[in-house]
Structures are given as structure tokens and as C-alpha cells.
């Protein structure tokens, strides 16, 4: 890539906690944030329905507002608030708050699958349900997918490249890759990357129910009795930085981005393709030189759906062959739910901390081995000591959009 890319800051907001450290602690300890939640369509919607979900508690932005002396709750949709708070934590960890570095040579690239779904549903309720000709004047900027990156850029004075990516469950993975590309090409020295999502709303949940994608009780990646995904909300941010730039200013080096693979199945809107997912992993392994590595931590897409987990296990076997069982596989959606556009970023944040600690967090809710997922080493039961210094983070999205990213710590 020409320039080595350091990771100098991490931030996270999810149902597991409102900091990167809190999310790691929960994952390491095997704590799940998944539980039953009542989704109420309101006065003009259908009867309320209870579904499993992992939702970030209200008030998570209070620490941001106290620190920065600015109330943001009424100005941004929930997905953008999550992105702003995660980015603020990552920038502070990188010692970049109030820094002149955040100017022309810094980028912001964040991924979101849908944008301001909560705002959209409230607006529809007002317009179609209550027959009001007027909606909130901030409706359009709160709905737009770029609302999160704009909020980060304006809050921290970033004047370099700023844009959002949207590719369903691969959105934040594509954002990380694009941010790294801006640094590798010399267009930026620093990039705030990641993503967020807040689409666990009554209307959106009914859509996921309609395609029979949701679990009845909880998320069980790679377990034979898995029956679907569990929706979550939240997100994460990473600070990518040219290695020489980071070293010159004495920044903390938390890890390194080594490269990625990206493919398109061009096959089916909801079913995965072995050629596409294994192709993305193979590219990432080649970019990072990990084909002969003794141990690589694999943070699986691991949605807990029958087809995805079977396909992902087959992809790991296809890429690593007889060495597949040497590489521990984790699936943190079993703890924090599926954040759609924010998932890959949160997986990356947890994986980097796992490498630093030398510990692989357990896959939760695993009951029974599945013969179709044989030949891979799923970490179950409890946290496991590991010697891996490298990680692969997978994001395989609806529409056949695949990303696999390689990191070192």
C-alpha cells in the first residue's frame, strides 16, 4: 500500500457499553446484551410485539454533552449520535481532540446501512398517521445517511475528505477500507473511520420479520440450533493514521491495518456465495501475508443464520485448508447483536483489544456442534488465551457485498 497504517484510537457505543473498554470487558467476560424488547408501532401501528434485541440505553450521549458543553440530542438521529460519541472517544484516545492535525489532512469515512430510520418512522407517523401537513424542520438532515460524518466533521473541524458508505452489513468495513485507502494514496494523514446503526425500530423490525431473518430467542452463531439473527444498535470508530505521522507526534500505537479483500457475489440478494466470501478472505490473507501464519484470530460475520454460518465455516476451510483449525473463530454478534452498518467496526474494535490482551472472547449461546460447520475452531464456553498477533474481521452483507479486513496488534 506504500504507507503503513497505524491504529491510534478506538471508540465504541453499543448495548454492551458506551466505551471501547466496556465493550471489550463485556465480550471477554461472556456477557450478553440480548434480551426481549417490546416494539410498539404506536397509535396507528399494529399491536406491540416482543422480540429479542440488543439496544443501547438512552442517555449514552450524556458524557459527550458534558465534556463538550454542547447538547446534541435533539439535533441528530440516534445513529448519528452513536457515531459522534464513538468518534469523540476514539479521537480523545488518539490525543487528537482540539488538535491542529484535524484539518485538511484528516478524513472522516463512516458506514451506515439505512441512516435515520427512527426519525423517518416518527415523521411517517406524524404525516400519515396523525394527518399533520408539517414534520420536524430537521427531518431531512436527520434522515440522510451522511448525517453522522457531517456531525463529526463539524464538531471537530475536519476539512479533508468526508463521506459515508452504505453497503448493508458491510458498510463500516467498506468505510474502514476507504479511509485506509485515502491514507495509503497520500490524500490524508489521519482518518476517522467506522460506522453505526439504529434501525431496531418497530417498522424496520417488521421488515426483518417479513424475510424470516430474526431469531426466536437469541443469536447462536455456528450452533446447530441457530435460527436467525438478533438486531442490535450501536457502532464504533477507529483512528487510522500514517505510521510515520503517528510516530512523529508520539501517538499511542494500538495496532496496524494490514489490508483487505472486497468482492461481490453477484448472485442473490440474501443468500451468500462461497466463491464471494472466500474470495474476500483470500485477498485479505494475501494482502497481510497470513497464509502460513501459525494463528490468526478470525472475527466471523457470524450472524446466527443457518445459511451464513454454514457458508462462513466453508469459507474459512477453503482459505486455510488443513490449517483452518489452528485459527480461533469468535462471533461477537452473539453478545451485542447485529448492528448492520456498525457491526464490522465494533468487531474490529473488539478484535484489536483481544489481540492486545491475548484472549479470545467466547461465542455465546452455543449449544450443539453443527456438522456443517465442522473443521473450524469456534471459541465456546469461556474466554481462551491465544498467541495470535493478527486478526481477520469479516463482513458479508445482503446483496453479496463482502469485505474481510486484516489487522495486527
Image (cartoon, rainbow, N blue to C red):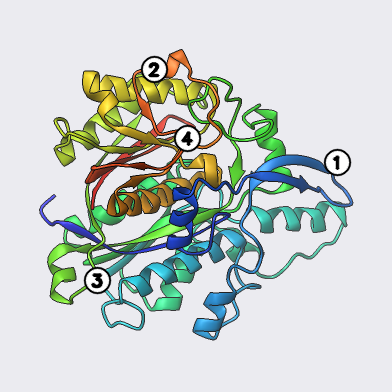
In the rendered structure, which disc, 2 or 1, sits on the residue that comes first in sequence? 1
**Residue under label 2:** 374
Q: Residues within 10 Å of mark 4 (few under 14, many from 20)?
A: some
Q: Nearer the viewer, mark 1 or mark 3?
A: 1
Badge count:
4
Counting from the top left corner in percent of width and height, residue 212 is at 66, 26
In the picture, measured across the screen, residue 289 lies left or right of residue 12, that is left
Disc number lying in front (3 or 2): 2
Q: Which mark is residue 105?
A: 3
Mark whose residue sits in front, 1 or 4: 4
Describe the element under mark 2 as helix, strand or loop: loop
Quick check: can you spot residue 267?
no
**Figure quadrant of residue 356:** bottom left
Q: Earlier in the sequence, mark 1 or mark 3?
A: 1
First along the sequence among labels 1 and 4 = 1
**Nearer the observer, 158 or 198:** 198
Q: Name the residue under label 1.
A: 46
- Give the structural element (helix, strand or loop) at label 4: loop
Q: In the image, which is nearer the foreground, mark 2 or mark 1?
A: 2
Residue 128: percent from left, percent from top: 82, 51
| Marks 4/3: CA–CA distance | 45 Å
Relative vertical location of residue 347 with respect to residue 192 in this rendering, above or below: above
Q: Which residue is disc 4 drawn over?
A: 381
Amino acid at each position: 500500500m506504500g504507507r503503513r497504517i497505524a491504529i491510534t484510537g478506538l471508540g465504541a457505543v453499543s448495548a454492551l457499553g458506551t466505551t471501547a473498554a466496556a465493550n471489550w470487558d463485556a465480550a471477554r467476560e461472556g456477557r450478553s446484551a440480548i434480551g426481549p424488547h417490546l416494539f410498539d408501532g404506536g397509535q396507528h401501528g399494529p399491536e406491540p410485539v416482543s422480540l429479542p434485541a440488543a439496544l443501547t440505553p438512552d442517555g449514552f450521549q450524556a458524557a459527550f454533552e458534558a465534556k463538550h458543553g454542547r447538547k446534541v440530542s435533539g439535533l441528530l438521529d440516534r445513529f448519528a449520535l452513536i457515531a459522534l460519541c464513538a468518534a469523540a472517544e476514539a479521537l480523545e484516545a488518539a490525543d487528537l481532540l482540539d488538535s491542529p492535525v484535524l484539518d485538511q489532512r484528516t478524513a472522516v469515512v463512516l458506514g451506515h446501512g439505512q441512516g435515520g430510520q427512527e426519525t423517518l418512522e416518527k415523521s411517517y407517523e406524524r404525516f400519515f398517521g396523525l394527518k399533520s401537513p408539517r414534520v420536524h424542520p430537521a427531518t431531512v438532515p436527520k434522515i440522510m445517511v451522511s448525517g453522522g460524518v457531517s456531525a463529526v466533521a463539524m464538531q471537530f473541524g475536519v476539512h479533508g475528505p468526508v463521506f459515508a458508505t452504505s453497503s448493508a452489513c458491510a458498510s463500516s468495513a467498506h468505510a474502514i477500507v476507504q479511509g485506509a485507502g485515502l491514507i495509503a494514496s497520500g490524500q490524508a494523514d489521519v482518518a476517522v473511520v467506522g460506522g453505526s446503526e439504529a434501525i431496531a425500530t418497530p417498522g424496520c423490525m417488521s421488515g426483518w420479520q417479513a424475510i424470516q431473518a430474526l431469531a426466536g430467542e437469541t443469536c447462536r452463531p455456528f450452533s446447530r440450533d441457530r435460527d436467525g439473527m438478533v438486531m442490535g444498535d450501536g457502532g464504533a470508530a477507529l483512528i487510522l493514521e500514517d505510521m510515520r505521522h503517528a510516530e512523529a507526534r508520539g501517538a499511542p500505537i494500538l495496532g496496524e491495518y494490514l489490508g483487505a479483500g472486497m468482492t461481490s457475489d453477484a448472485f442473490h440478494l440474501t443468500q451468500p456465495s462461497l466463491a464471494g466470501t472466500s474470495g474476500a478472505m483470500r485477498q485479505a490473507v494475501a494482502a497481510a501475508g497470513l497464509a502460513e501464519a501459525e494463528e490468526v484470530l478470525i472475527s466471523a460475520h457470524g450472524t446466527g443464520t443457518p445459511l451464513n454460518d454454514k457458508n462462513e465455516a466453508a469459507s474459512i476451510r477453503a482459505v486455510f485448508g488443513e490449517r483452518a483449525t489452528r485459527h480461533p473463530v469468535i462471533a461477537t454478534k452473539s453478545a451485542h447483536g447485529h448492528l448492520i452498518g456498525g457491526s464490522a467496526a465494533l468487531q474490529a474494535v473488539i478484535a484489536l483489544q483481544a489481540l492486545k490482551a491475548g484472549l479470545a472472547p467466547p461465542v455465546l449461546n452455543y449449544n450443539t456442534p453443527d456438522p456443517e460447520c465442522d473443521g473450524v475452531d469456534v471459541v465456546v464456553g469461556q474466554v481462551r488465551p491465544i498467541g495470535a498477533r493478527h486478526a481477520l474481521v469479516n463482513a458479508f452483507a445482503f446483496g453479496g457485498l463482502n469485505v474481510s479486513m486484516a489487522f495486527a496488534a
